[in-house]
Amino acid sequence: MENYLGIIMNSKFLTNITKTSIVYATLAFGFSLIGILLPYSSSLGDPLSSATVEHIVGHIVWGMIAGIAAFSLRYFFTTGIFAIILDFDHIIQFFGIEAVPRMGHSLPFALLSLILMMLIFNKKDYRLGAISFAAVFSHMSFDTLINAGKFPLFVPFFDESVKFQDLDWIYLQIIAIITILAATLFEKRKFKSKIMN
């Protein structure tokens, strides 16, 4: 237990999580700005209406559950944080500007964040790319579980929102877990072959 606390309190550990979280939040907010330019933008509601403690903690825990597949404390916590800060795409609502809501809750953002996070931090950090992608699915999984599962899944290319229902939250969370697990196994395999050579 003391060993785990020592790792968590390590300044490098905290700095890494903080840096990646700030960049991910900036990407989510930046991507939401595209929604101002789209012809199908609309007036957005109050961003704080769903910001309850249960909602925030739920997203973090849901992200951490997916993050277990990274077999790393750093990625475990980072996935939880990414899953909640994806909601930075709601910040634009505070300004009362017409835009497409929930821009970050989309496949294009998931793919873009995967690529950009790896380019910004480390091209060989497949787990960071995977959790950037998986956090979107984990976030949508929890939203679907609490009956808020309507997303502009293909924005900015299509304006139609996709409504998930019933047990779809399970499939979304499975996608998140498999994505992280695949990246983890791929990284470990590459590391093992590097040692062997």
Image: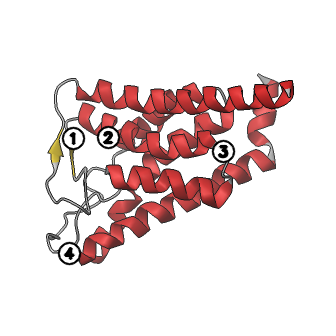
Return the disc, 4 or 1, that comes first in the chain's sequence: 4
Residue occupied by mark 2: 140
Q: What residue type is disc 3 on?
A: Asp
Alpha carbon distance from label 2 to label 3:
24 Å
Q: Nearer the viewer, mark 3 or mark 4?
A: 3
Q: Which mark is residue 125?
A: 3
Q: CA distance from mark 1 to mark 3?
A: 30 Å
Residue 17: image tag:
none
Disc 2 is placed on an element classified as helix
Kindly indicate the quadrant of the structure image that contains residue 35.
Answer: bottom left
Q: Is residue 162 visible?
A: yes
Whichever of callouts 2 and 3 sits on the residue coming sooner in the sequence is 3
Callout 1: SS = loop
- Label 1 or label 2, whichever comes before in sequence order: 2
* SS for dot 3: loop
Mark 3 closeness class: few <14, some 14–19, many ≥20 residues within 10 Å: some
Verify CB contact (< 8 Å) between mark 1 and mark 2. Answer: yes
Q: How far apart are labels 3 and 4 at the CA level?
A: 37 Å
Mark linked to residue 98: 4
Question: Label 1 vs label 2: CA separation?
Answer: 7 Å
Q: Nearer the viewer, residue 27 or 182?
A: 182
